[in-house]
Image (spheres, helix red, strand yellow):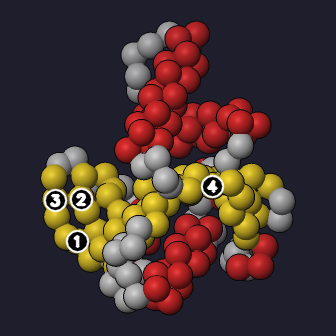
Amino acid sequence: MAVEQNELSLEPVTTADEAFLLALYADVRAQEMAFLPLPEAQKGPFLQSQFHAQEAQYRGAYPQADFLIICWGGAQIGRFSVMREQTRIHAIDLAVLSDWRGQGIGTAVFQQLLDEAKEKGVPVTLSVAMGNPAIRLYERLGFTLEEEQPPYQTMKWRP
């Protein structure tokens, strides 16, 4: 199913979204958690602590960023965090529920961002874990490798 731009919306995160964001975080990390040598009863609290640590890190490093819920047809299906500065737009985090991956959600979200960057005449930057399948999406959209600092690489799109 191809995603129509008019069915996609980005809504500001509120405190009422925490349960969804935690479930999304668990969904994104599900494969990794399957191999973690922890009893099942400990995986939930571990994920919750990791989720809160990530939230604190993002909000501490990017206090002026927009933290958004990706919605499609009114359903919450992901999150997107972005920092807009005068000289660039920095995509902090994009996560989509596994049932919605591969359907053009990431492309649609980034296309909106690239259109905004083109209008403002500024580049878009992001950092992504090496080997992350999303790198193919970013390359398709015109991002190029700027720097590698394992385990991450920085990519940039220029208008």
Identity, as a three-letter code, of the amino acid under mark 1: Leu
Residue type at mark 2 is Gln
Give the number of the mark in front: 4 or 2.
4
Residue matched to label 1:
145
Q: Secondary structure at mark 2?
A: strand
Q: CA distance from mark 4 to mark 3?
A: 27 Å
Residue 157 falls left or right of residue 148: right
Q: Give me the C-alpha separation between circle 4 and circle 2.
A: 23 Å
Q: Which mark is residue 148?
A: 3
Local packing at callout 4 (Cα closer than 10 Å; few below 14, some 14-19, many 20+) is many
Taking the image as drawn, is residue 34 in sight?
no
Crowding at mark 2 (Cα within 10 Å: few <14, some 14-19, many 20+): some
Name the quadrant of the C terminus: bottom left
In the image, what residue occupies the spot 46% across and 66% down? 84
Distance, label 3 to label 1, CA atoms, is 8 Å
Given the current orientation, which residue lies at the most extreme right position?
A: 74
Disc on the earlier residue, 2 or 3: 3
- Residue 82 % position (x, y): 49, 60
Say which mark, if any, is on residue 153.
Answer: 2
Q: For the residues marked 1 and 4, what is the alpha-carbon distance in whole angstroms?
A: 26 Å
Q: Which residue is mark 4?
A: 68
Q: Amino acid at mark 3?
A: Glu
Q: Nearer the viewer, mark 4 or mark 3?
A: 4
Residue 14, position as x, y percentages in the image? 71, 43
Horizontal relation, residue 133 to residue 151: left or right: right
**Quick check: marks 4 and 3 in contact, CB under 8 Å?**
no
Q: Is residue 74 left or right of residue 130?
A: right
Viewer-side residue, 106 vs 16: 16
Q: Residue at x 50, y 36 (%)?
A: 55
